[in-house]
Amino acid sequence: MPRKKEVEQSVPTYLSEKVRNLPNRPGVYIFHGEEDKILYVGKAKSLKKRVSSYFRHNGFASPRLRKLVELIRDISFIRTETEAEALIVEARLIKHYQPFFNIELKMGERYPYIKITRDPYPKVEITRHKADDGSTYIGPYTRVKELRQVLRLMERYFPLRNCSLNLKEAPVQSRPCLRYNMGKCLGPCAGLCTQREYQELVDDVILFLRGQTSALVESLRKKMNEAVESLAFEKAAFYRDAIRALWRLSRQQISFALRDPLDKEIWKALERLQEILGIGSPLWRIEGCDISHLSGRETYGVFVVFEQGMPNPSLYRRYVIKTVEGIDDFRSIEEIVRRRYSSLIEKNMPLPQLLLVDGGALQLSFALKALNELGIENIYAVALAKEEEELYLPDSRSPLKLPLDDPGLNLLRRIRDEAHRFALSSHNNKFSKRYSRSALEDIPGVGKRRAAALLAAFGSVSHIASKTPEELEKVDNIGPRLARHILMYLKGDNDNESIGKKTT
């Protein structure tokens, strides 16, 4: 049987160059036609291999495919960390832009959601239909198998019901079902828990499924401490194990979850930004950077990340300025831009489509200098000045003055303000930790190691001061004498006893 003839499609030089420079990584590719109209959106495990295949097809390629290639005038792409994330982005873009050559996915998604019903004692279900019924829907998710595995793991630490009983007037039966005896349900059907206790568990489940692991761990840690104080050690051990399991899970999941569909206001803002900046590809990821100073001594830089127009705090990063002496915001911006994006390139991580710098033309020029030195051409950088809300573009001599109610400007302001907030919170956390550690280290006989152990056990100096000597003695290397001395010192009575000296 003769082999199908390979045909090399005639491709303009500028498109060939774009295809050659595509990464061998997962992502979404976008074919643009005349007037930047989006013709087709596709996902790929390897962007370079997939897009190249369109221009090197066999002689029996469909007329539809040949027509698509003929109409392509530009190619853009969005890098993603996983193929599953590429599926997410593809579905969102197709649903919004309705490209002519995309036949499937136009009619909406059929991915499953986790549904938490609107009942006095809600239950957790998997559904493919999102209704306006007052229930809480989380997802949708791209992989059902992994979703079911996560739900099975959840059963141990979040024992909610999955039965079909009508529990509007609990209890409805005298004995709970087998799931209660297996530790997989709180037994609301038999009145074995209060509605408040059950709702607290539901709230924890929602935090977990939305990826708010830190907030959930803090909630569980509080419950663990309350259990210890009431001498309920078995319950405290349960919460301790739950915290450990959550940290393990948070490193693995839930990367296969899709965000809720973008609302119209966010789409409007993103499209307006594309229009202002003249960018053809959707602004799927925008990063904002800011510089801040701690007591005029240390300088910090931060990056915040917005995906689909919404902040993603798990991707925020802080940088201590290392190469700049004194206070120099311009060179500090250059340093953090160079460090961040050289690191992302080295790790083969997705780059943003847009970088927002807090400041004016000079700040922007130093950011562009770092990007140029790294050879990065596909990150568009702009700067937004605070006082006049003026937008500085790379190729413009004068700033762009937009109406204050412009949706694109408002999104940029939100990103800039979030970067500023994160920078300030970084300083507050750093100062708080430094103060706590130094206050303890000033106590004779404590030192760095014991100070760290005390803070790890009790969280803050004020909590340590409120404890009894017996409670402090439970910390490694804290004996009865040192425990009493620490409390006396923290309460201001530090002349009565000295560590290492006998008293008479």
Image (spheres, helix red, strand yellow):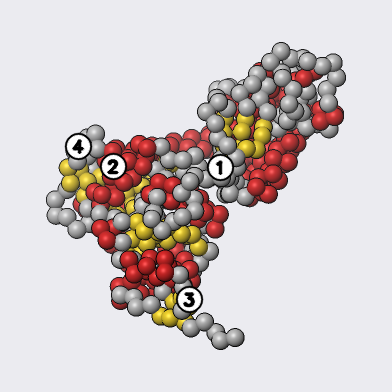
Q: Is residue 331 left or right of residue 215?
A: left
Disc ID at residue 327: none
Q: Are marks 4 and 2 in contact (CB under 8 Å)?
A: no
Residue 200 screen position, x and y as percent? 64, 24
Give residue 63's quadrant in the image. bottom left
Give residue 19's quadrant in the image. bottom left
Name which residue lies at 24% across and 34% down. 405
> Looking at the rendering, in which quadrant would you find the N terminus?
bottom right
Q: Circle 3 sits in a helix, a strand or a loop, which is it?
A: loop
How far apart in space, not on screen, are marks 4 and 2 (Cα)? 10 Å
Looking at the image, is mark 2 or mark 3 nearer the viewer? 3
Name the amino acid type tagged 3: Phe
Q: Of the two numbered discs 4 and 3 on the same chain, state the one appearing first in sequence.
A: 3
Name the amino acid type tagged 2: Gly
Q: Nearer the viewer, residue 334 or 327?
A: 334
Q: Of the two numbered discs 4 and 1 on the same chain, state the one appearing first in sequence.
A: 1
Whether residue 230 is visible: no
Tell me the residue that label 2 is attached to.
408
In the image, residue 201 above or below residue 18: above
Name which residue lies at 24% across and 38% down. 406
Name which residue lies at 46% across and 55% down. 103
Looking at the image, is mark 3 or mark 1 nearer the viewer? 3
Name the amino acid type tagged 4: Pro
Tell me the residue that label 3 is attached to.
60
Extreme residue toward the bottom, this view? 2
Tell me the residue that label 4 is attached to.
403
